[in-house]
Image (cartoon, helix red, strand yellow):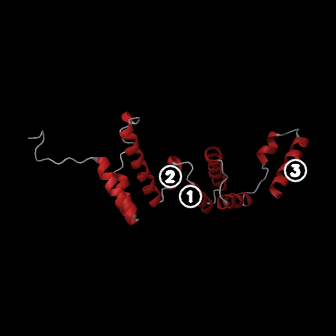
């Protein structure tokens, strides 16, 4: 004699948990995408400091991250887990492939800052190598607009050009 006798009740967190665990166990990207579509975000944000909700919410958040990794959604992984070096490496590789050297350097700086601040460690040799590759491929030049803005500043421009040449030479 229930309120909705004969009706079934489906709890989104339980459905997500089951589908996410199945995706992670099977490493099936299609199942992972389906599970991600059912992720409703933080569990009970109004009760986030309740012990029972915090532990369960953390489990669901970790499953969510695993699904993002499985589906290679690296930008989202890096945003949710700033210390995830693999995510940063994958993003750096993508930026290099797109010939966006500045994005590689920005991504490296984010990774470096987080690892040093939170863990007290430096980025891996692989991350440093990607950064160095981007630096090696980034030409440093002085273009016309800078020269136009420095009219009457020949001495300062010469110092700047020498510094840029030295930086470009390593």
| Front tag of 3 and 1 | 1
Instruction: Check residue 77 in the rendering and tell me which mark sits there, or answer none.
Output: 2
Apparent side of residue 5 relative to residue 93 in the rendered image (left or right) = left
- Residue, far right: 155
Q: Position of residue 144 (x, y in %)?
A: 78, 48
Quadrant in which residue 168 is drawn: bottom right
Badge 2 density bin: few <14, some 14–19, many ≥20, Cα 10 Å? many
Residues at marks 3 and 1 touching, judged by CB atoms closer than 8 Å:
no
The mark nearer the N terminus, 1 or 2, is 2
**Circle 3: element type:** helix
Apparent side of residue 151 relative to residue 36 in the rendered image (left or right) = right
Residues at marks 1 and 2 touching, judged by CB atoms closer than 8 Å:
yes
Q: Position of residue 20 (x, y in %)?
A: 36, 56
Q: Quadrant of the N terminus?
A: top left
Residues 46 and 140: in front is 46
The CA span between labels 1 and 2 is 9 Å
Q: Position of residue 128 (x, y in %)?
A: 69, 58
The CA span between labels 2 and 3 is 41 Å
The mark nearer the N terminus, 2 or 3, is 2
Residues at marks 2 and 3 touching, judged by CB atoms closer than 8 Å:
no
Instruction: Check residue 118 in the rendering and tell me which mark sits there, or answer none.
Output: none
Apparent side of residue 105 relative to residue 170 in the rendered image (left or right) = left
Up-down: is 166 above or below 151? below
Q: Is residue 11 visible?
A: yes
Residues 82 and 121: in front is 121
Apparent side of residue 61 relative to residue 115 in the rendered image (left or right) = left
Q: Which residue is mark 1?
A: 86
**Circle 1: element type:** helix
| Front tag of 2 and 3 | 2
Q: Which residue is mark 3?
A: 162
Q: Position of residue 14 (x, y in %)?
A: 30, 50
């Amino acid at each position: 004699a229930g309120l909705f006798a004969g009706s079934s009740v489906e709890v989104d967190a339980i459905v997500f948990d089951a589908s996410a665990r199945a995706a992670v166990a099977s490493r099936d990207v299609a199942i992972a995408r389906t599970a991600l579509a059912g992720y409703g975000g933080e569990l009970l944000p109004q009760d986030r400091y309740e012990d029972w909700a915090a532990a369960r919410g953390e489990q669901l958040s970790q499953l969510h991250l695993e699904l993002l990794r499985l589906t290679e959604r690296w930008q989202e992984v890096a945003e949710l887990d700033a210390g995830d070096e693999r995510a940063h490496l994958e993003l750096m590789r993508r930026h290099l492939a797109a010939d966006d050297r500045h994005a590689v350097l920005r991504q490296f700086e984010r990774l470096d800052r987080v690892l040093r601040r939170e863990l007290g460690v430096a980025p891996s040799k692989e991350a440093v190598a990607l950064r160095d590759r981007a630096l090696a491929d980034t030409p440093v030049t002085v273009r016309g607009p800078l020269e136009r803005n420095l009219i009457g500043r020949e001495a300062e421009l010469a110092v700047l050009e020498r510094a840029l040449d030295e930086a470009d030479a390593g």
